[in-house]
Image: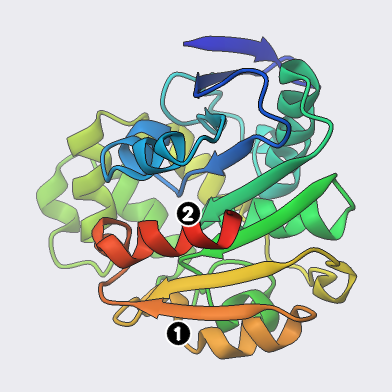
Amino acid sequence: MKSFPSFDGVRIAYREWGPADADVPVVLLHGFVVDGATNWVAPGIVDALVRAGRRVIVPDARGHGASDKPHDPAAYGETRMARDLAGLTDVVGAERFDLVGYSMGAVVSLLAAAAGQPLRRLVVAGVGAGIVELGGLDTRALPPQEVAAALLAEDPAQAATSAAAPMRMLADAVGADRRALAAQVGMAHQEPIELERISVPTLVLCGGEDALAQRPEVLAKAIPDAELRVVPGDHLGAVRDPGFTAAIVEFLA
């Protein structure tokens, strides 16, 4: 595990696999609550990309995994995470890279692409019309205040009937810092993203039963020349479908 201090001093941890001299590495940005290993290593996505000859770089977002976990909400938001990404690619010497983001990581990826970070190809997964209509993750399906309350409840039983109960269970299962996660919830991006500025080939990828990625065709139509691929699974299960991994490897080939 390597790390570097980001623009505001928050230390970002990351891992690397594959040939270090590859021309165009792949950066994988994980979703909320989990870390890079849970989102990308465990389902076999990293292995599949390495077998395809790719150099793969997987950071843990601030507040997650082995990265620093400040409790101040001012340290969070996907805009800051996009700046972390720019710092990471400078550190690893990636002049151009492919970018794959899931859920929260997809929001970060879209912000980075719209800002003109040097991408070759882009995959955004686990998101849908909420990006276009709300500027971020679909808070209509999972209200932020409900997620924060579930995360901060002293007794997990207090969150058992909440729509955010799976988030709390996942946070406990991976040993996440729940206060850091709640800080990110309060700062989650909810402003228009200039999707029309994205000029690289883009794949929108999601599970057909994903409540947080409803109407993905709305997002695909908002990004110039984007493709759409739907695989079986809900928000937590789609990444484990073989078609999800295959779609990423094929699109980035």
**Whole-percent x and y of residue 251?**
56, 62
**Whole-percent x and y of residue 36?**
42, 34
- Could you tell me which secondary element the residue under label 1 belongs to? loop
Give me the residue at 36% from left, 63% from top: 244
Residue type for callout 2: Val
Q: How is the image coloured?
A: rainbow
Q: CA distance from mark 2 to mark 1?
A: 24 Å
Query: Is the residue marked by circle 2 packed among few (<14), some (14-19), or many (20+) residues within 10 Å?
Result: some
Residue 75 horizontal side relative to residue 171, left or right:
right
Q: Where 90 sits versus 202, above or below?
A: above
Q: Where 68 sits versus 57, above or below?
A: above
In the picture of the structure, the residue carrying the numbered disc 1 is: 214
Q: Is residue 34 visible to us here? A: no
Residue type for callout 1: Gln
In the picture of the structure, the residue carrying the numbered disc 2 is: 249
Q: Is residue 144 visible to us here? A: yes
Give me the residue at 69% from left, 71% from top: 135
